[in-house]
Amino acid sequence: MNIRMPSSPASFTATVTPADRAANPYYYVPFEVPAGTTRIDVTMDYRKAEDCVIDLGAFDPRVTDYPSQQGFRGWSGGARDRFFIALDDATPGYVHGEIPPGRWQVVLGLYKVPPQGATVTLTVSLDDAPRPLVPQPVRTRPVRKGAGWYRGDLHCHTWHSDAKGPPELLHAAAQQAGLDFLAVADHNTITQRRYFHPHSSPDLVFVRGMEVTTAEGHANVFGVDDWLDFRMTRPTDAHTLARLVHERGGLLSINHDKPPIPWSYELPAIDCMEVWQANWFNWNWASLEKYQRRLASGLRISAIGSSDYHQPDRLLPEGPFVLARPTTVLWLPELSEDAVLAAMKAGRGYVTESPTGPHLAITIAGHPMGSSVPGRSVAAEAEANGAAGDRLVWIDATGIVAEETIGGDFWKGEFTGTPSRFLRAEIVAEASRPRLMAEFFAALGDKPLPWGIAEREVETQPLRRALTNPIYIDG
C-alpha cells in the first residue's frame, strides 16, 4: 500500500488467518511517508471477539528483522485501535519525534485469530502542518543518602500500555503506599519515561523498566535506556533477549511463571525471577515451586515480588489488590536506581505481602541474603518482625528442613545444620490467617473468586506472608 500526501486518507484491508499466525505472529502493513510529514494517524477496525484479538504497533524505515535496534515507534497491544505519531507528541505507548521519510510499517500482533480468519482494515492519514520538534526526556539520577531497608514495586502499568490510568495517578498511588522506588514496566514500550524520567526524585526513585510481552511468556527488563525488540518467535530467541539486555548493563527477570501465561521459551541467563505476583492466591505457589526447582538444580537467581498493578482511572484506597501487593524490600547503601539494580542482582532482600508487611531477613555468620558461604555446617539467624504466632519455615534444595512458631512481634530464630545448596526462609500465616482471609474476602465483596482459583486452593494453600532470597552454600 502506498500513500502520498496530500491525498485523502488511504485504507488497506487484509484477512489474516491461523496459518498467518503460525508462520509469524507479527503481520506487517507497509505504507510510504514523504519528506515533510509532521504527523501520522492510524486507525484499525476489525470485529473483536473472545477468540479474535489483534494487537497494534508501528515501526519506521530504520527497523530490521529481529532483533532490531532501531525503528520502534510504538506498541499498544490490544488496548487501542488507533494512534498518532507527531514531531511534538504521540499517543501513549508511541514515540514522538522525527518522522523520517520512507517505508513505514503498521505491525499487527496476531494474538488470537479465529479459525475462519479476521478481516482488518487500516486507515492511514498523513499531515504536514508546521509543528515543533520536541526532544525525548532526559534521564535523571536522584539519590537519597543513607543505608537501610527500602521498599518498592518492580512491575506495574500505566495507560502507555494496557492500564486506564495516567502516570500521574500511578505516581500518587506509589506515594500513598509509602514506596521508596518503583519500576514501571509497560508492555513492549518505554514511552512512560516521558513522565517518569523528569519526575524521579529522592523521595521516590523510578527504575527504568519494560515488560517484554509475548504469547509464550513475559519478562521484565530493568535498567536499560533502549527499547528492546519483543518480536520473539523461536524458543531460542530468549537467549538473544538476555544477550541484548546484558550487553546494555541491564537485568532480565522472568515474570509470573504460572497460569495463565507461564514462561514457555528456553530459560536464558536471567538475573531475577518474579516469584510472587499480585495477591498470594493468584497461583503464586506455582511460581515459587518453579523457583525452588531452579535453585535446587544449581541456578542462582534472585527472587523478587511485584504487583503487576494496572493503574485504573482513579486512585484506589489501600487494600489487598492494589499497588505494592507484594512489596520487594532491599538493603541499599543509598536509595538510587543503581543501588536498587545492584541489590536486585545480588539478592539483597526479601518479598513481603505489602508495604507494611512482615520484615524477614536471614544471615549466616553475618553474610546477608544473596551471599555465598563456604563449608557445609552453618548457623543461620532469622529476624522476623510483625508476624507473631505465624510459622517460620527454613528451606534448602531438598525442601523444608526446619520450622517453628514466631514467638513475638520482634523475634529472632536460629537454624543449625548442613543445608543442601542454599538456605532460605518463609513466613507462613497461622495466627494471622483469619484476619488476612477476612480482608481478602472483604475486598472481593460480591465478586466470585478471581484468577480461576477454586475454593479448595483458598482453603488449603499455605498463605505466605514473606519470603527471603537464599544464601548459597559452597561446601
Image: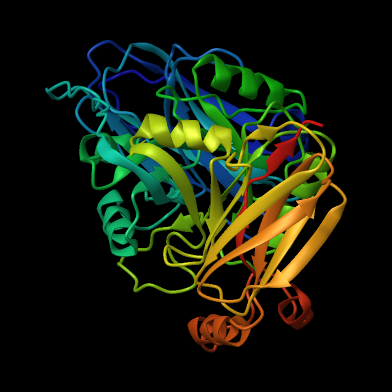
Residue under the image location 88 percent in, 50 percent down:
398
**Residue 225 falls left or right of residue 364:** left
Q: Quadrant of residue 60?
A: top left
Q: Look at the image and name its color scheme.
A: rainbow
- Seen at 55% across and 87% down, the residue is 438
Q: Nearer the viewer, residue 80 or 471?
A: 471
On the picture, is 26 further left or further right than 198? right
Residue 443 lies, in percent from the top left, at: 49, 81
Residue 260 lies, in percent from the top left, at 71, 56
Q: Is residue 469 above or below residue 450?
A: above
Between 39 and 255, the one nearer to me in the picture: 255
**Total marks placed:** 0
| Res. 272 in view | yes
Report if residue 286 is visible in the image.
Answer: no
Residue at the (51%, 54%) spot, across then down: 308
From the image, which quarter does the C terminus lie in?
A: top right
The extreme right residue here reads 398
Residue 341 lies left or right of residue 383; in this view the side is left
The image quarter containing residue 401 is bottom right
**Which residue is drawn at the image coordinates 37% and 33% (left, top)?**
337
The foreground one among 330 and 325 is 330
Image: 134 above or below 52:
above
Please provide percent x and percent y for residue 52: 64, 52
Q: Is residue 448 above or below residue 245?
A: below
Query: Seen in the image, is 168 located left or right of residue 387?
Result: left
Q: Position of residue 371 (x, y in %)?
A: 63, 35
Residues 447 and 269: in front is 269
